[in-house]
Image (tube, helix red, strand yellow):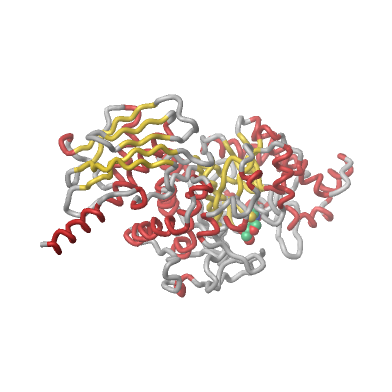
Amino acid sequence: MKKYFFILLLLLCSSVLNAQNLKLIPYPSNVKMAGSRLAMARGSGFYTDNPRFKYAVNYLNEEIGSPHKTAARKQKITIAITPGLSKPGAYRLSTVGKVISIKSSDSAGVFNGVITLLQLYQSAKKEGANTMLPGLIINDEPRYQWRGFMLDESRHFFGKEVVKQLLNWMAFYKLNRFHWHLTDAQGWRLAIEKYPLLATVGGIGNFTDSTAQARYYTQNDIREIVKYAKRRNIEIVPEIDMPGHATGATHAYPELSGGTTPRYENFTFNPAKEGTYQFMGNVLKEVKALFPDGRIHIGGDEVALGIKAWESNPDVQKLMTDKGFTDYQQAEFYFLKRIADTVQKLNYKVMCWDETVAAGLPTSNVIIDWWRQNKPEVLTEAINKGYNIILCPRLPLYLDFVQDSTHRSGRKWGGLFNTYLDIYHFPENSLADSICKKTNIIGIQANLWTETVSSKKRLDYLLFPRLAAAAEAGWCASSAKNDDMFNQRLKAHLLYYKKAGIYYYDPFNPKEHEEAIDQQPKQEVKD
Ligand code: TNX
């Protein structure tokens, strides 16, 4: 008898929910457990009376695999926009009592509340039984407004279905900005109607095989993906990289080239030809029409790799004399200013890599991606000049870096690499508190360059679970971070990956899948 009583007590204790059992990533700012549970009948879905947010609840139902349930089998969610929640994207979720409620000051916050509910449901769900949602009240808000992920599809092209899958996972982790690197030396991946050869010729090849058949997105593909992202509260920023990394385009239209150096063939656009600006103006007009979210990334990185060619380019020589430029960087900045001006005239914001901090672009309309962790002075300069800034330093936010000391392929920086915990503890593990708190630092972003990523398997392996760590880094205050608790939650998420057929890296069993992803790229990868 005594024994049974003891077992019963144990069972009771283990079933009492505490906040630590919640497998939420990113973890909410504030959770109060009510001690109750809300039962959802087997197979039931959710509904709301608020017509404005039916789309969000429909999304939830689709994700839980319960899109078409009868009213009798649905769990009501009341959704209200209530002014006064402190930050954009903040929300309050209650599952206490019989009705679930989500309150927020904006639709991004409603979506974030829905995603938290989705994660609660996924972790409570039991096959063939009622789902017992934990009764709780969550008050939650993001640390950073910009929680981004960048994918390079020039070096290797992955295509629509892979991108959609990534957008799904981004939504699941409340990542809300997708930076899409669509053009580079190894391929131009976006159809432009006025210049069809950009895609059909510029899209030929990739980092592993320069003769591979052209791969690119049609304009209809883009519209479909933009819509798909919008439904998931994700803005897309397309990147058209210039004036360097232009070989995809100059391959298709050689007259745009600024010349060749021994190592980099036709790497830049010609900054001295009016034709270049007309071409770019037309391209950017089509890009704006395709991407409605108000920002275009114009690259601006690593022009130095190809700038030597300008010394023997007669057009550039003439530009130098006409404008009285004394070094070639002035011609580079002249190009960037004209392009930034074109984007501004389209009423779009300009984004660019941190090489452009010295270019004198207007601070009010430009957002800088700080990527060179070895140049903290450039970050300071960008802050002092008043630019809005996204932090995406190679260490620890580049996902093409290896993530375990035993991994052989992928990049390192002086022997250093990026573990999921390095990402989890960003930015406070890398930057002074005074910098992390600067209000012009609007967010963080994890970037995946794909020189060493030629298969979906390897893509998955590099992204999961580091995408989850990046999401938590962008959302949670540094004081809320705790390795043990994150690890516990992450273990539950590894099971989600497994179920979804994702070839993930398991930090708790690091040797497990290593061999299959360990392929070396054929070309040299620069640091
Ligand atoms: C530098 S990071 C680049 C990319 C490369 C990466 C790795 C950045 C803004 N530019 O074009 O993919 O190094 O080689």
The quadrant the N terminus occupies is bottom left
- The answer to whether 527 appears left or right of 190 in the picture is right
**Foreground of the two, 225 or 421:** 421
Residue 223: image location, x then y, percent: 45, 40
For this orientation, the residue located farthest to the left is 1
Task: Name the residue nearer the viewer: 77 or 163.
Answer: 77
Question: Could you tell me which quadrant the C terminus lies in?
Answer: bottom right
Determine whether 188 is above or below 458 in the image.
above
> At 56% across and 44% down in the image, what residue appears?
238
Report how many numbered discs are placed on residues in the image: 0
Q: Quadrant of residue 28?
A: top left
Residue closer to the observer: 465 or 164 = 465
- x, y percent for residue 360: 76, 38
User: Would residue 297 be visible to someone looking at this image?
Assistant: yes
Q: Is residue 94 left or right of residue 260?
A: left
> Is 51 rendered above or below residue 389?
above
Left or right: 45 in relation to 264: left
Measuring from the top left, give residue 14's x and y in whole percent. 26, 56
Q: Quadrant of residue 363?
A: top right
Residue drawn where x is 84% and y is 50% of the image = 314
The quadrant where ligand 1 appears is bottom right
Identify which residue is drawn at 63% across, 42% down.
389
**Which residue reaches farthest front?**
2
Q: Residue furthest top?
A: 83
Taking the spot 44% from the left edge, 24% from the top edge, the residue there is 83
| Vertical relation: 37 (above or below) 487 | above
User: Is there any visible trace of residue 256 in the rendered image?
Assistant: no
Q: Where's residue 405, x and y in %?
A: 55, 71
Q: Is 199 in front, or is 499?
A: 499
